[in-house]
Amino acid sequence: MLASIFAACIIVQVFFAGMALFMGYAGWGLHISFVPMFMYLPLLVLVTGIIGRLPKKLIWMNLMLVAMIILQYITVEFSTEMGVLGALHPIIAFLLFGASLSMAQQSWKYV
């Protein structure tokens, strides 16, 4: 269930980024301030998954989500130093969404 909530949060986050592109700075404020509200969900899923003894495949998928979140922060914090690699930020967001959907689908049978 938490993976589904995380996937929904990514959709909202992409919406806020779209607002920022087409409506100006207010959208960036929402995009930036919304992240702390859901960025720890994969860690919570990881801990509850280990306690609940979810299959190792789901645990590894969750670790992948955590790694992608770290990459998201790297692409933002070092975007000026990274040059064109900063453009990976939206691509990683799509990968996060796909991985979280896949994880949500696979984990529902354990709820």
Image (cartoon, rainbow, N blue to C red):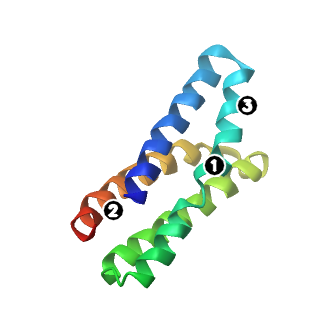
Disc 1 from disc 2: Cα separation: 20 Å
- Disc 2 residue type (three-letter): Met
- Quarter of the picture holding the C terminus: bottom left
- Helix, strand or loop for disc 1: helix
- Disc 1 residue type (three-letter): Met
Horizontally, residue 3 falls left or right of residue 77, namely left
Q: Earlier in the sequence, mark 2 or mark 3?
A: 3
Disc 2 from disc 3: Cα separation: 29 Å
Residue beneath the point at 70% across and 48% down = 76
100 or 52: nearer the viewer: 52
- Disc 3 residue type (three-letter): Gly
Most distant residue in the front direction: 111
Q: Residue tagged by mark 1? A: 37
88 or 51: nearer the viewer: 51
Horizontally, residue 33 falls left or right of residue 67, namely right
Disc 3 from disc 1: Cα separation: 13 Å
Residue beneath the point at 32% across and 78% down = 57
80 or 60: nearer the viewer: 60
Q: In this view, does 31 lie above or below 6?
A: above
Residue 86: x %, y % from top left: 65, 46
Label 3: how many Cα within 10 Å (few below 14, some 14–19, many 20+): few
Q: Residue tagged by mark 2? A: 103
- Specify the label residue 29 is tagged with: 3
Label 1: how many Cα within 10 Å (few below 14, some 14–19, many 20+): few
- Quarter of the picture holding the N terminus: bottom left
Label 2: how many Cα within 10 Å (few below 14, some 14–19, many 20+): many
Residue 31: x %, y % from top left: 65, 35
Residue 6: x %, y % from top left: 46, 52
Asked whether the beta carbons under mark 2 and mark 3 sit within 8 Å of each other, the answer is no
- Helix, strand or loop for disc 2: helix
Q: In this view, does 50 lie above or below 17?
A: below
Asked whether the beta carbons under mark 1 and mark 2 sit within 8 Å of each other, the answer is no
